[in-house]
Amino acid sequence: MSSTTAILSWHAHIYYDPAQTRGVAEALRQRIGERFAVQLGRWHDVPVGPHTAAMYQVAFTPEVFASFVPWLMLQRDGLDVLVHPNTLAPRDDHLQHALWLGDKRALKPDVLPLRIAAADESPIVPNTTPTLDAP
Ligand code: ZN
């Protein structure tokens, strides 16, 4: 198995400030859903898991990366974004393998397992109905 095929899926975590930039995050979320077959996660106005700021998650398959991530680079409208692969090694995926758009945020490493079983990796189930071509 090559290192590329070890990537089962991707997450983009879109950070925002509930008091300042939630509206920007809402607009970006809508635009993502109109353009890409991805799984949009719940709003987390209070930090959860390894995250230290409010965010929502966008989960997507490797096939979507090449169109979605470059679009997000240009369209994130000042929001900070963590993009990380899922390789069954959550701590490395977040801390070593990630890429950041905008400013790099602090993460809580202690809550990230070193390894998880393949059965514990959630499959991507897109919940959007894209109707527009990017951008
Ligand atoms: Zn994630």
Image (tube, helix red, strand yellow):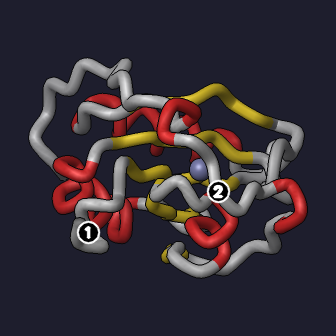
Q: Which residue, given by chain and number where applicable, does mark 1 sit on?
A: 4
**Horizontal and vertical percent position of residue 125:** 36, 22
On whether ligand 1 comes within 8 Å of the CB at mark 2, the answer is no
Q: Residue at x 64, y 26 (%)?
A: 42
Q: Earlier in the sequence, mark 1 or mark 2?
A: 1
**Horizontal and vertical percent position of residue 16:** 71, 53
Q: Up-down: is 12 above or below 60?
A: below
Q: Residue at x 17, y 49 (%)?
A: 63
Kind of residue at disc 1: Thr
Q: Is residue 17 left or right of residue 63?
A: right
Q: Quadrant of residue 56?
A: top right
Dot 1: element: loop
Dot 2: element: loop
Q: Is residue 113 left or right of residue 118?
A: right
**Mark 1 and mark 2: Cα distance apart in space:** 18 Å
Q: Residue at x 56, y 63 (%)?
A: 81
Q: Is residue 118 left or right of residue 96?
A: left
The N terminus, quarter of image = bottom left
Q: Up-down: is 36 above or below 74?
A: above
Q: Residue at x 35, y 38 (%)?
A: 31
Q: Which residue, given by chain and number where applicable, does mark 2 sit on?
A: 115
**Horizontal and vertical percent position of residue 21:** 70, 51
